[in-house]
Amino acid sequence: MEGKASLLDNMIGVGDMVLLEPLSEDSFLENLKKRFDHNEIYTYIGSVVISMNPYRSLPIYTPEKVEEYRNRNFYELSPHIYALADEAYRSLRDQDKDQCILITGESGAGKTEASKLVMSYVAAVCGKGQEVNKVKEQLLQSNPVLEAFGNAKTVRNDNSSRFGKYMDIEFDFKGDPLGGVISNYLLEKSRVVKQPRGERNFHVFYQLLSGASDETLKKLKLDRDVSKYNYLCLDSASVSGVDDAANFRTVRNAMQIVGFMEDEVQSVLQLVAAVLKLGNIEFKPESRSNGLDESRVKDKNDLKEMCELLGIEQSVLERAFSYRTVEAKSEKVSTTLNVAQAYYARDALAKNLYSRLFSWLVTRINGSIKAQAKTRHKVMGVLDIYGFEIFEDNSFEQFIINYCNEKLQQIFIELTLREEQEEYIREGIEWTNIEYFNNAVICDLMENNQNGILAMLDEECLRPGTVTDETFLDKLNTICAEHQHFESRLSKNSKFLTDHSLPHNCFRIQHYAGKVLYRVEGFVDKNNDLLYRDLSQAMYKANHNLIKQLFPEGSPAKINLKRPPTAGFQFKASVGTLMRNLQTKNPNYIRCIKPNDKKASHIFTESLVCHQVRYLGLMENVRVRRAGYAFRQAYEPCLERYKMLCKKTWPHWKGPARQGVEVLMADLKVPAEEYSYGRSKIFIRNPRTLFFLEERRRQCLQDLAALIQKIYRGWKCRRQFLLMKKSQVVVAAWYRRYAQEKKYKKIKRATTVMQSYARGWQARKLLRQLKHQKRCEEAATTIAAYWHGTQARRELRRLKEEARRKHAVAVIWAYWQGLKVRREYRKFFRANAGKKIYNFTVQRIIQKYFLNLRKNLPSMSPIDKSWPTRPYSFLDGVHTELRRIFHLWRCKKYRSQFTEEKKAVYEEKLEASKLFKDRKALYPSSVSQSFKGDYLEINKNPKYQKLHSAVDEKVLLADTISKINRANGKGTPRIFLLTKKSVVLADQKTGQVKASVPLLDLASVSVSKQSDGFFALKLKEGSASAVKGDFLLSSERLIEIITKLYRLSAANAERVPLSVDISDEFLVQFKTDKVCVKFIQGSPRNGNSASCKRKNNRLLEVSVPSTP
């Protein structure tokens, strides 16, 4: 079956509006909304694509999607802009038909994005190669440049195209791009000098100020502040989600890719800067002696900088703003300009300078991207032009834009009908004339060379005498009064005299999209588009190559007294050329629709969409398509899709596809009037017939699915049975093998046992024989050994007896000799023996004492007070001295392991011992507590970042304490910070510094003898910190706080060490009053903590729980 979902598979709503049943405006809108809510933004009307702007990114433009739609039939997949782009590209490549893609819709509907998607798809599917890739890149990169200079933020669209663009992309015979040509239509140059509220000027101004480097801005004499330029609207200077700086870099890169030289880029930026400078030039009135008013430049600084940028003499341009020269034949008349005329001349110069720069950019891009080969090219045109505009205040620009849309609607109807007629003729189907609204009468009203509105506007502009917008309206009221699509309150047609919705200075035209009210104010000036010749000549005198190219009429050699063509005449000619160009190509249409005015996703405003559906003529388009046959399909895919509905065509039809379709339709008994056979397609008249076929196909697919499931389950069960049968045979074979193997092993084991018993009996019998023989041999040997032993022992006893006799003689002789010696020396021995024995004994005792001491030495802990007992009293002094030396030695070893931080902690502990030991009951509990210092981790905790930045010095101690209020004795939490120079108290919640006391201002610290945490910081009288009085504080870490305060004061050579007073009753100075703080033993009020209570104005009593 089919691998991809087609237009008719799994549809959300109806993918092709031609198949919508029943067809009405409500059902049309409901179908659009249903598909929009399910992110289906594309819908067909035959070959026309309706595109809804989703106002968000959707994952439907990936490279995988490009490959999915590549070389596929238009109706083969679900609706997508890629399908239309692929159809147009394949028709151009394979059938050699020039194509054009017409993208229309109102501002914000997504026309520009649609044109980008078409171009990116064509770039992705066409050929590859270095030259081809270069051409594709240049074509794609021309968009950012034109968008920067031609797009702007409006109330309806953040990236609204303010010009019409038509691009012809040229291809070779293989379908590879060779180049392109861009045509631009009617740039909205009035936006340069004035923008409606909530809108911006063209993007390039903001991108230049945001993204250019400081050096570039300095060269261009610009400032980054947008508010300094009169031509830039301030209330919308920035757009949410738009990075002007990044876009400026993108534009610079795109200009480089397209082929702009660096000097050309700088020239363009200079002209953009000149336009901004031009808007800052202001004028003041000045009276002349003849009573006429003339204008003068107020501040010449901006004029000077602009002239420096463009290389113009300041005096020449200044005169051009003050005087106007009128030439008639051989006469020249110079008149002064008043302030209003000077401002008009300034704005006219700015608009012309920018619009001519934009036209030069288009020409320059065309020079880079045009095809180099001279052979005939295939062409695909992409038209991205403004949609139909209906504003509250419609002027000349809206009139011109709506005229262009009328012409596009006219050619759309003509080409659509022609395409239908050609297909019917090509397929041999009888053609029936279709009734439709022809807007040619509206086009004639606007463009008729005699009585058309544009012709009368040109005639009024060229007429001598006083010409105003009112005279133009009077002329319209006279000539067009009877026209059925023209309405004016002052016309001869009396039915509009009481129409208060039609102001006196307006006229109304009934366009194909609805009625539009035009205000005639500004029509004549905007159509004249007049630039004084003095300004053109001043521009031509500029020492700037690009300026000379933009104002060729300023050359003295090309003085032409003829009046230049009007804006309306030029646009009418451009539209005529465009229409003739489009009629030579095969059209493809993309109708863009904006779902809401909020530029938000998932919002479908039905009234707004309905308005666009009406003025785009989509319902009429559907009716034109359905006037003949609603659906058509080639025979091969039709047979492939519906062949399962007939037994004769299922599963394979071997004859021609047309015959198979005929057999199929006959078998289904579809009425003959519901379809017709063409040469290559079948045409179905009513959508109900198609839905009937789809419903039968769906039912058949369900039946086929059930049949496939049944066959699959039977095959699966049989396969499982055969597998189990095969497995049983294998298991039985393995079991029989195992049983036989087990039986064989049992017999083998029994045989082995019998053999082992037989061999054992034979071995034991042989062993008994060998043992008997060995015993006989050993008996003889034993008897001989005993005999030899007896003989040897007898000889030994004889020899021992003889030796004893000899030894006895020697011993007796030795004793006798010793006796004689002792008798001789006895008198000397008795004199020294006692001293020697004593010394020997003492020496042995000391040696034994040291050895025993070495074995029983105590541990290396300095707090270990154990020591071996002394064995003798005469060693008492040595024993004590050795104990002292050992203790000093192990203390030294213990101290050598300390770091500098640990030494400092022990020094603080030692200082605390000197201050509080046996003086403060709280001290013993603090001995085991380490002095950490920064308990709040103020450097790391982001909560105290503000407090940390307010304290410049290193924080030695940070803790939360309580500040005692003298009024009620209650405590308020405060953050206590101690640095080398000051004590800081801050609010615990906000981190705001409440008090900062330099250490030099501290006189003393007072604490009680009890186990409480109260202490008073007493300040020196007369110091700056003593204004509010002393501080009475409470902290669990009182010992550490006072110890650190005392050490800091002692380390300062400039002052006396801080006095620490320990007493159960002391005075505290609160502002001008002295209050006695008294500590008493009592039952606790707040658990086991001390509590403070105010007794009177002069006494605070602190109740301290008694310690057990």
Image: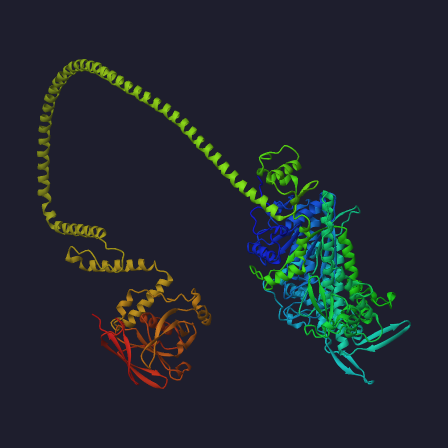
> Can residue 175 be seen?
no
Left or right: 322 as drawn, with respect to 993:
right
Choose top left, top right, bottom left or bottom right for residue 963: bottom left
Residue 281 falls in image quadrant = bottom right
Q: Find residue 763 and report its horizontal and vertical position in percent.
A: 22, 15
Q: Which of 548 and 529 is in front in this view?
A: 529
Single out the residue that lies furthest toward the right.
Answer: 330
Q: Is residue 758 above or below residue 529?
A: above
In the image as oriented, which residue stretches furthest toward the bottom? 1072
Tell me if I can see residue 141 in this picture. yes
Q: Residue at x 28, y 79 (%)?
A: 1093
Residue 143 occupies quadrant: bottom right
**Foreground pick, 5 / 1042:** 5
Q: Which of 303 and 1013 is in front in this view?
A: 303
Q: Position of residue 436 (x, y in %)?
A: 71, 56
Number of marks in picture: 0
Location of residue 106 with respect to 337 vertically, above or below:
above
User: Whole-percent x and y of residue 807?
Assistant: 10, 30
Tell me the quarter of the image containing the C terminus: bottom left
In this rendering, position of residue 997 left or right of residue 148? left
Pick the residue in front: 582 or 262.
Answer: 582
Q: In this view, does 685 lie above or below 293?
A: above
* Rendering coords of residue 93 (x, y %): 72, 44
Q: Quadrant of the N terminus?
A: top right
Q: In this view, does 816 lie to the left or right of 537?
A: left
Asked which colour scheme the image uses, the reply is rainbow
